[in-house]
């Protein structure tokens, strides 16, 4: 199903235009810079440890920032850290140098979600179709509603793609059930954990969704 009319596009840190406007009227600066917003999203929403930002592309009110973990095994700094996830951000309220930024999606070249499409309306159980390459082929799935923290979900599960060391993506299809949401919108998070112990998420693909009420 398509997105509801007038639905808010943002996933994090704001869940409505009213929240954006209220933040814009304040003095906090945490979400007025795309790289800073992307790093905090990776850390606080995805669960990526030691998230760093890399390249940024785009102009005006739309940007894309590459993020990835700076640390590896044992928490030691990687010799050559690089982006594993591209975070899409937009200014969904006041624009310009001081306008707040909202995350509207994220993508990894190793995890491709074909269905449901971004900004679809879903119900439980949701059927996931796509392609992935991950350690042992395992991709974790979390269904989240707006305002949930990193360790909160409506439901979770996994799908299995390819674990081939060549990096070739393999198809996946699976269902994830989730409890009744209390908010109109949320996101589906597909992620691969870091092979390094206690380093959290390595990469992720995130799509905005809305819930059948």
Image (tube, rainbow, N blue to C red):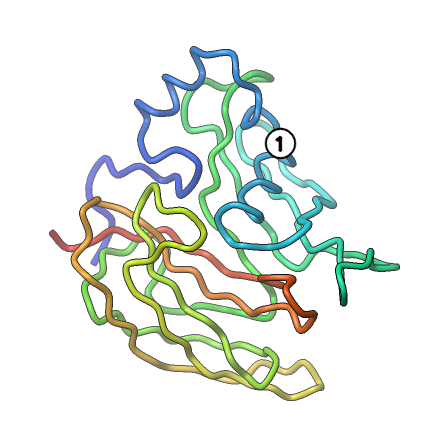
* Residue 131 to residue 71: above or below: below
Residue at 32% x, 26% y: name it: 17
Q: Is residue 114 left or right of residue 106?
A: left
Pointer 1: what residue? 59
Q: Residue furthest right?
A: 79
* Residue 32 to residue 41: above or below: above
**Few, some or many residues within 10 Å of mark 1 (<14, 14–19, 20+):** few
The part of the image, by quadrant, that contains residue 192 is: bottom right
Residue at 26% x, 70% y: name it: 126
Residue at 46% x, 83% y: name it: 160
Q: Position of residue 76 (x, y in %)?
A: 81, 59
Q: Is residue 199 left or right of residue 44?
A: right
Q: Residue furthest bottom?
A: 164
Judging depth in this view, the residue of 120 and 16 nearest the camera is 16
Residue at 35% x, 73% y: name it: 128
Q: Position of residue 48 (x, y in %)?
A: 60, 55
Q: Residue furthest left?
A: 213
Quadrant where the image shows the N terminus: bottom left
Q: How many numbered marks, from 0 up?
A: 1
Q: Position of residue 193 (x, y in %)?
A: 58, 69
* Residue 119 to residue 100: above or below: below
Q: Position of residue 20 (x, y in %)?
A: 39, 24
Judging depth in this view, the residue of 15 and 88 nearest the camera is 15
């Amino acid at each position: 199903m398509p997105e509801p009319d007038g639905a808010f596009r943002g996933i994090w840190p704001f869940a409505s235009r009213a929240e954006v406007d209220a933040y814009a009227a304040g003095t906090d600066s945490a979400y007025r810079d795309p790289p800073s917003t992307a790093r905090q999203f990776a850390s606080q929403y995805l669960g990526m440890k030691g998230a760093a930002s890399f390249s940024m592309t785009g102009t005006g009110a739309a940007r894309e920032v590459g993020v990835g973990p700076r640390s590896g095994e044992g928490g030691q700094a990687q010799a050559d850290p690089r982006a594993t996830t591209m975070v899409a951000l937009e200014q969904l309220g006041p624009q310009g140098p001081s306008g707040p930024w909202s995350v509207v999606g994220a993508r990894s070249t190793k995890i491709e979600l074909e269905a449901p499409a971004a900004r679809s309306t879903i119900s439980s159980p949701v059927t996931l179709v796509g392609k992935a390459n991950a350690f042992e082929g395992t991709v974790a799935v979390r269904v989240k509603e707006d305002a949930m923290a990193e360790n909160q979900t409506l439901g979770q599960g996994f799908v299995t793609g390819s674990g081939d060391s060549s990096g070739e993506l393999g198809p996946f299809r699976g269902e994830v059930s989730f409890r009744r949401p209390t908010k109109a919108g949320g996101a589906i998070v597909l992620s691969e954990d870091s092979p390094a112990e206690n380093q959290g998420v390595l990469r992720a693909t995130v799509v905005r969704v809305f819930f059948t009420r």
